[in-house]
Image (cartoon, helix red, strand yellow):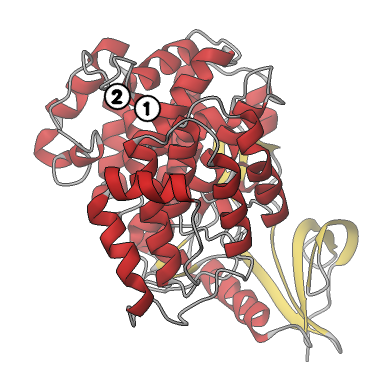
Amino acid sequence: MSSPRPQEIRVLKQTPAMKTYLGYDAVREQNVIVKEVCLDAMQSWISAFRMEIEVLQAIESGWMPRLLDQGYGQQSLWFSETFLEGESLDDWLEKKPDRHQKEEIFRQIIRLVSQVHQAGYLYLDLKADNILIRHGHACLIDFNAALPIGSSRPLLASRESLPPEGAMGLPMSEKADQIGLGRLHLKLLGPSLVSWIALSRKPEKRFRSLGELERAAGRAQRLRPKAAVACLLILAGTLVPIGMGVLSHESAEQSEETVQQDRLPSAAEYCKKMTAQQKENKEGRVELQEWLLASRAALNENHLGLAGYLYSHLPKEKDQFSVRLDQTLLALMLHEDIRRDDLEALIEEVPAQIQYDEQLVLLFQVLSEQKVFLTSTRLSSLFEQIAPLEEPSKDLCRNALAYLIECRKEGMERIKLPAPIEEAMQNKAADLWKIYSQSEDDPSASSSGSAENPIV
């Protein structure tokens, strides 16, 4: 016989399939959190519901919910868990805690996630909404996205903590939760080499364990901005296999004097500067020109830590086209949800707005890296519009061809390029042009996917 369902006090979250509410347990004489799922919901939702019960039974901590009861009705299954009363992480941050307090909260979050791993599960939903601060201590709530370690294809992981390997359907190790931890580190403490390593797209380049992440974060916080790179050198014995390769596509021995070919600061330089600003408890708003230069560095170097900071700290001129374009490219790099219509509307503005081809270089680079495929109609239109502009650079020719080759692999037919664009590509990227021109008969460029289908 089913247990009595706690009386509903207030609905906290509701979808057609699931409902979460604050309830009152008359037997225990206390408020509880109740979750229920409809019996006619998709099997994936019911499986996630049962998995959450399994996880709650396996973990034991005063800073995470504890399973109290479960039951069923005519139309739904339900369970109740302890109600942890506290303030949200965002509300806590509104009180402007000092850096030491934020460091301590981050360490506590790492330890809570470690306990979940020790029980055999991945949390996979690390975000501010799921962190409560109770009596000065972090609490971890809402385990509906959790899965056993080694699982693939997470169903309910939030976009901001979804690991790339999970999005590709590959098995996930404990390193998968470093994506969410890297985002939280950015939110709490600003951009740093620690968040950069944790957010690496490749699991092998992240920290080897959460203990190692915690130790690296503790050491990094105590260093002056000028010592940031030295920090990684000090940790070389443990971080070289994971993090040093992330420092640069060119060399792991770059120092703070390193600059890009055009003599502009590198992503690491901007990271240190903005981290210093964060330490001074400034609002974090970045001036327009500096923001644009920093975003270019983040995109060029695939620097996820800096990208996340810039994405959440827009300049006051956020409606300017250059900012909107860079913000969209940063969002794609960070796996944020971008509506296809919004992306294509923005790209439609490109020819009328761009004065230099640098933004086009970045556009094709990010679209290619993130496997975002425009329709052949949109691509043809874009090339027709940019053909009258100044002669495309070598970088633009190479990036555009690399993208067109990826499109062919997805089954999109070759498009007819304007004569000036085609001539420039043949002259400035002969090797890639040969691959693209021969792809008409390439059997791998078949029907593995259709670029006409919206995927954004």
Which is nearer the eye, 193 or 21?
193
Give the residue number, with chain letter if any, for mark 1.
192
> In the rendered view of the protein, which quadrant contains the N terminus?
bottom right
Q: Residues within 10 Å of mark 2 (few under 14, many from 20)?
A: many
> In the rendered view of the protein, which quadrant contains the C terminus?
bottom right
Residue 233: horizontal and vertical position, in percent?
A: 13, 27
Q: Which of marks 1 and 2 is in front?
A: 1
Q: Which mark is residue 182?
A: none
Please indicate, yes or no, whether residue 199 appears anywhere in the rendered image. no
Name the kind of residue labelled 1 in the image. Answer: Ser
Q: Residue at 53% x, 28% y: name it.
A: 310
Name the kind of residue labelled 2 in the image. Answer: Ala
Element type at mark 1: loop
Classify residue 181 by image quadrant: top left
Inter-mark Cα distance, 1 to 2: 8 Å
Element type at mark 2: helix
Give the residue number, with chain letter if any, for mark 2.
220
On screen, 223 above or below 123?
A: above
On screen, 107 above or below 268?
A: below
Label 1 close to label 2 by CB (< 8 Å) = yes
Going from the N terminus, do you reach mark 1 or mark 2 first?
1
Q: Residue at 40% x, 63% y: name it.
A: 406
Residue 12: horizontal and vertical position, in percent?
A: 82, 55
Residue 285: horizontal and vertical position, in percent?
A: 60, 15
